[in-house]
Image: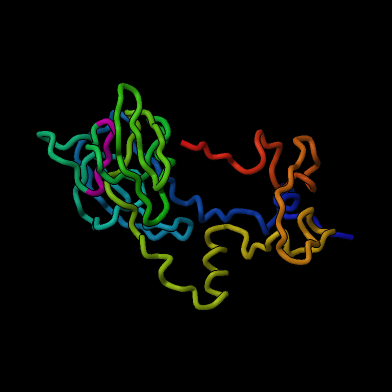
Amino acid sequence: MGKRITQQARGRGGPTFKVRKIAFRHEIKYPNLKVKGEGKISKLIHSPGHSAPLAEIKIDNSKFIVPAASGIYEGQEVWIGKRPENKDPESGDVLALVDINQGTKVFNVENSPGDGGKILRTAGSSGIVMNKDDKKVEVLIRRRSLKVNKDARAVVGVVAGEGRKMKPYVKAGKKHHIMKAVGRKWHRTSAVKVNAIDHPFGGGRGKRIKSKIAKRNSPPGLKVGHIRPSKTGRKKTRRR
């Protein structure tokens, strides 16, 4: 009798796949869209559920938490919105993309104005503000670009903690405790390594991987690989 494959076990739930509450202890968000002015970084937070340190910013009688920008410190003053006399924004400032100069590095970008920031939140990540038009602003992320609403907000700078992957774990026990705090299943076994009875990709006697297409209405035990893809095969490049 075979065991449940990972997809089935995850769907059923249980303590192995349950995300710890510690990962949601700090909610990353921006203040209300109408809030503008000078804020102060009241606290830098080490959160086990996030790869980057977090910054708690206080403005008026409210406070909010965002990923910390590289180089900021407790007690530093940052601006929500444009600085007075239209001065250039500094690292840690929160602005709408339309108000940020081209070529500026940003992170924690909103998909739509008011959602609190969904893009570029990992330690060391950032995007570059590029072309602007009447409705959209282009943000360059490595080899691809995204077009986001011009009123969506972002933090100027680069997310802190860029060198976190440079330090080795040294031993498996240390990584075990880190992944347990984050609330992610570890370690993960590759599907081609298991027996044929445990996974559709298993029993290959080595990694001779071929792309497999799963039907849209297939049961959870077979719904692996390409889920009803619109195109298959190698991409053909056009000759100029």
Viewed as shown, does residue 90 lie left or right of 214? left
Asked if residue 104 is positioned above or below residue 123 in the image, the reply reads above
Q: Camera-side residue: 3 or 195? A: 195
User: Could you tell me residue 95's position as x and y percent?
Assistant: 27, 37
Residue under the point 23% across and 49% down: 91
Viewed as shown, does residue 232 lie left or right of 159? right
Residue 96 lies in the magenta stretch: yes
Q: Camera-side residue: 110 or 145? A: 145
User: Could you tell me residue 222's position as x and y percent?
Assistant: 79, 46
* The residue positioned farthest toward the bottom in the image shown: 170
User: Could you tell me residue 21's position as x and y percent?
Assistant: 55, 53
* The residue positioned farthest toward the right in the image shown: 1
Residue 131 lies in the magenta stretch: no
Bounds of the magenta segment: 91-98
Q: Quadrant of the N terminus?
A: bottom right
Residue under the point 30% across and 52% down: 69
User: Could you tell me residue 234's position as x and y percent?
Assistant: 62, 43
* The residue positioned farthest toward the front in the image shown: 240
